[in-house]
Amino acid sequence: MSNLRIKVTPRAASNAVVGWQDERREELSLKVTAPAEGGKANAAVIRLLAEELNIPKSALQIQRGTRSRHKLISLDISQEALNTWLETVD
C-alpha cells in the first residue's frame, strides 16, 4: 500500500496530471473537468489516476480530503511501482 498527496483543480479545461506543486515533491497537482459537487471531482481523480497508473479504480481510495482540494490517496500498488511512475511526472 502506497500513499500520494495531491491537489486537485476542478472544472479545468481537461483532465491531466500537471506536475509537482513545489521542488520538495510532496504534493502532486491534478486537473479534472468535473465540478467539485456531489463527489464528481473525486470520482474523476480516481479515474484519472487509475488510467495514468494502469491499475483498477478499486486499487485507489481517498483517505483524507474528500471535501478539500488537498487529498491523501492510498494506492494498492507497491511503493516501487508508484515511485517509477512519479519519476515520469515533471
Image: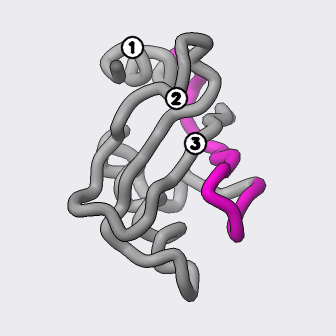
Residue pushed farthest right?
Answer: 64
Which residue was labeled with disc 1? 87
Q: Dividing the picture into quarters, in which one does residue 23 lie?
A: top right
Which residue bears the numbered disc 3?
Answer: 6
Say what secondary structure mark 3 lies in: strand
Foreground residue, 16 or 46?
A: 16
Q: Which structural element holds mark 2?
A: loop
- Say which of 5 and 54 sits in front: 5
Instruction: Return the x and y of residue 62 as percentages of the image width and height.
Output: 66, 57
**Horizontal arrangement in the rendering, residue 59 relative to residue 52 (left or right):** right
Mark 2: amino acid = Gln
Q: Give the spatial CA distance, label 1 vs label 3.
A: 15 Å
Q: Nearer the N terminus, badge 1 or badge 3? A: 3
* 75 part of magenta stretch: yes
- Label 3 neighbour load within 10 Å: few <14, some 14-19, many 20+: many
In the foreground, 7 or 66: 7
Residue flagged by tag 3: what amino acid is it? Ile
Viewer-closest of 74 and 64: 64
Is residue 81 depicted above or below 57 in this figure?
Answer: above
Q: What residue is drawn where x is 31% and y is 68%?
A: 33
Q: Mark 2 = which residue?
A: 21
Badge number at residue 42: none
Q: Which residue is drawn at 63% across and 23% down?
A: 26
The span picked out in magenta is 64-80
- Which image quadrant: the N terminus? top right
Horizontal and vertical percent for residue 27?
59, 31
Q: What residue type is labelled 1?
A: Glu
